[in-house]
Image: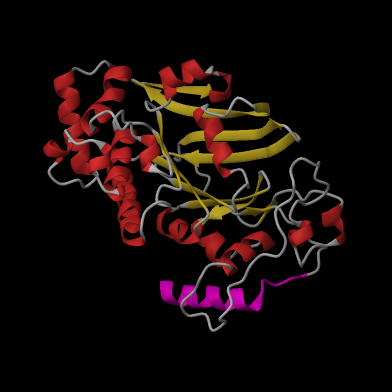
């Protein structure tokens, strides 16, 4: 599917990031490679601490001061009028990022809407702020657009809501307002960092539907950060599975859910609650993620992998190609590796998911 028609919006190449801590240097992102195309949704999944949020903070240029980019590039392609511009975001200063990229071309929706909104400003003023700052939009025009954005994100009585303060809205409405702010400057890329974590389940699915709907209308590209595979199944076109600062498997959403190849992905899928499961215990991946203060020899997942081979403890696996769109970094895919099937319970679960889908 890597056809020429797909327009690349973002390309991360060999990204490495280290944080200085009191305990020493922590290599949190280790040679990350990733691409995103126009109008598509990419979900980045993995346990807490796998490097998902650090990756998007690097894209936004909002890494904390003890973070250091050791290597790599983040190429962003966007349109300025009729010309196409390609720039490496890592070459921008924080000030340049704020002026040229953040909120204007790349917007972000954070986990907790309450920390994203200013409690002392009305909702209307907060939506209009970006348009006035980035595009010098006249106030009247910005007001009109803000009202229509509130309508777009499904808020009733938008004119009245413009005068409200954040504390006067429910959590779900606040998150909708945050999405309206994120969309106010017509960005080409929307990053959602666990946008529904703080919300209850019914509101959660409405917010996910809303983002999908907006994507259809505007053709915007979306990156989702989540550890919830249920969310991934609903929204993503492509999935990248992260572990210990690296991508260990990537593919289309169907490839990852129906034909996973990495033992870590098997573990994540097995740990999803399932109503049809006869087992009364929920699966958990044994052990815990590696301490990135220490240099990792071999495959970072090897100590937790019951299928680990001898080579896993000595040499890091490359990305093996499963199909044009599907790659996984595990020695089990080497032609000389023993043939190991995914766990039986997971196979049964995938078969029943396939039956349901058909």
Residue 331 in view in this figure: no
Q: Does 244 sit left or right of 331 as displayed?
A: left
85 and 349: which is toward the camera: 349
Q: What residue appears at the point 77 percent right and 67 percent down from the top-left corner? A: 307
Where does the image place residue 276, in percent across and percent down from the top left?
A: 48, 80
Colour theme: secondary structure
Where does the image place residue 202, in percent across and percent down from the top left?
A: 31, 61
Q: Does 273 sit left or right of 186 as displayed?
A: right
Verify whether residue 340 appears in magenta: yes
Q: What residue appears at the point 76 percent right and 70 percent down from the top-left corner? A: 339
Q: What residue appears at the point 76 percent right and 35 percent down from the top-left corner? A: 23
Seen in the picture, residue 329 relative to 160 is either above or below; the reply is below
Write the start and end of the magenta stretch as one range.
339-358
Seen in the picture, residue 270 relative to 78 is either above or below; the reply is below
- Indicate the quadrant containing the C terminus: top left, top right, bottom left or bottom right: bottom left
Where does the image place residue 314, in percent across and percent down from the top left?
A: 87, 51
Verify whether residue 100 appears in magenta: no
Q: What residue appears at the point 32 percent right and 51 percent down from the top-left corner? A: 207
Question: For residue 255, which quarter of the picture?
Answer: bottom right
Seen in the picture, residue 88 relative to 333 is either above or below; the reply is above
Residue 53 in view in this figure: yes
């Amino acid at each position: 599917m890597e056809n020429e028609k797909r327009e690349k919006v973002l390309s991360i190449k060999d990204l490495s990031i280290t944080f200085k801590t009191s305990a020493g240097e922590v290599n949190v992102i280790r040679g990350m490679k990733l691409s995103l195309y126009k109008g598509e949704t990419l979900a980045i999944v993995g346990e807490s601490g796998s490097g998902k949020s650090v990756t998007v903070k690097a894209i936004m240029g909002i890494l904390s001061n003890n973070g250091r980019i050791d290597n790599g590039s983040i190429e962003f392609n966007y349109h300025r009028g009729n010309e196409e511009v390609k720039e490496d975001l890592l070459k921008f200063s924080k000030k340049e990022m704020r002026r040229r990229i953040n909120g204007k071309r790349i917007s972000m929706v954070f986990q907790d809407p309450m920390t994203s909104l200013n409690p002392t400003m009305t909702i209307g003023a907060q939506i209009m702020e970006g348009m006035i700052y980035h595009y010098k939009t006249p106030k009247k025009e910005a007001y009109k657009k803000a009202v229509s954005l509130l309508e777009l994100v499904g808020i009733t009585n938008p004119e009245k809501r413009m005068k409200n303060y954040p504390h006067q809205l429910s959590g779900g409405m606040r998150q909708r307002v945050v999405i309206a702010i994120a969309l106010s400057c017509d960005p080409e890329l929307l990053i959602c960092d666990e946008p529904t974590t703080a919300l209850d389940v019914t509101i959660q699915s409405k917010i996910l539907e809303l983002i999908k709907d907006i994507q259809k209308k505007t053709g915007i590209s979306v990156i989702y950060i989540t550890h919830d595979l249920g969310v991934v199944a609903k929204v993503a076109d492509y999935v990248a599975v992260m572990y210990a600062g690296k991508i260990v498997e990537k593919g289309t959403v169907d490839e990852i859910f129906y034909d996973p190849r990495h033992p870590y992905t098997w573990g994540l899928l097995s740990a999803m609650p399932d109503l049809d499961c006869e087992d009364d215990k929920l699966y958990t991946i044994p052990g815990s993620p590696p301490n990135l203060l220490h240099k990792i020899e071999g495959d970072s997942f090897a100590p937790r992998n019951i299928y680990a081979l001898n080579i896993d403890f000595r040499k890091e696996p490359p990305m093996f190609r499963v199909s044009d769109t599907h790659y996984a970094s595990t020695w089990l895919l080497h032609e000389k590796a023993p043939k190991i099937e995914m766990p039986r319970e997971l196979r049964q679960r995938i078969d029943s998911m396939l039956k349901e889908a058909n």
